[in-house]
Amino acid sequence: MFVLLHSAVTKEVVGGQVTVGCSFTWAGTNNKYFCKGTCSGKDILVETKGSKNVTQDRYRIEDKGDGVFYVTIKNLMKTDSGTYWCGVVRYGRDSYQEVHLTVTDGRFTLSR
């Protein structure tokens, strides 16, 4: 079981990047992580592990130390579309925020 605080929805384009803000109460020094799927093992894409700023492949997490942290995904691909979770390690049950990401081709037309 987990505690879901709130969710966010974002839409971005292939090749771009997205930064998601996550905010939790009473989470200043707790480890934070960002995952896709069940949030265990290989589903965890990046985690702080006691550090404030961590980069893992295309994922970066920046922990502000006050319960707020930001996750950036670079070089977005269509396969990045899906449901992600911002997580905070807690005694007992971790807390989560749901993030829905849609990545599109980003074809735009100009009209005159």
Image (cartoon, rainbow, N blue to C red):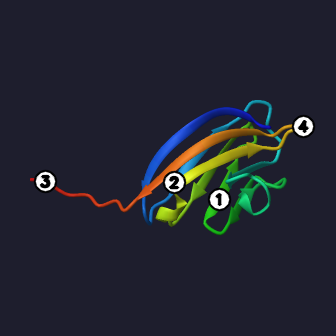
Q: Distance between the residues labelled 3 and 4?
A: 55 Å
Give the mark nearest the N terminus, 1 or 2. 2
- The residue singled out by tag 4 in the image is 92
- The residue singled out by tag 3 in the image is 111
For the N terminus, the image quarter is: top right
Q: Is mark 1 on a helix, strand or loop?
A: strand
Report the mark closest to the observer, 1 or 4.
4
Query: Is residue 76 something one can see in this rendering?
Result: no
Q: Which of the 4 quarters of the picture holds residue 29?
A: top right
- The residue singled out by tag 2 in the image is 18
89 lies left or right of 102: right
Q: Are marks 4 and 2 in contact (CB under 8 Å)?
A: no
47 lies left or right of 21: right
Q: What amino acid is at disc 2? A: Val
Report the mark closest to the observer, 1 or 3.
3
Q: How crowded is mark 2: few (under 14 residues within 10 Å), some or many (20 or more)?
A: some
Image coordinates for residue 47, horizontal then vertical, percent: 76, 56
Give the mark nearest the N terminus, 1 or 3. 1
Q: Distance between the residues labelled 3 and 2?
A: 27 Å
Image coordinates for residue 12, horizontal then vertical, percent: 43, 54
Q: Is mark 2 on a helix, strand or loop?
A: strand
Q: What amino acid is at disc 1? A: Arg
Q: Do the residues labelled 1 and 4 touch (CB within 8 Å)?
A: no
Q: What element carries label 4?
A: loop
Q: How far apart are marks 1 and 2 (CA)?
A: 10 Å
Q: What amino acid is at disc 3? A: Ser
Give the mark nearest the N terminus, 3 or 4. 4
Q: Residues within 10 Å of mark 1 (few under 14, many from 20)?
A: many
Q: Is mark 3 on a helix, strand or loop?
A: loop
- The residue singled out by tag 1 in the image is 60
Report the mark closest to the observer, 4 or 2.
4
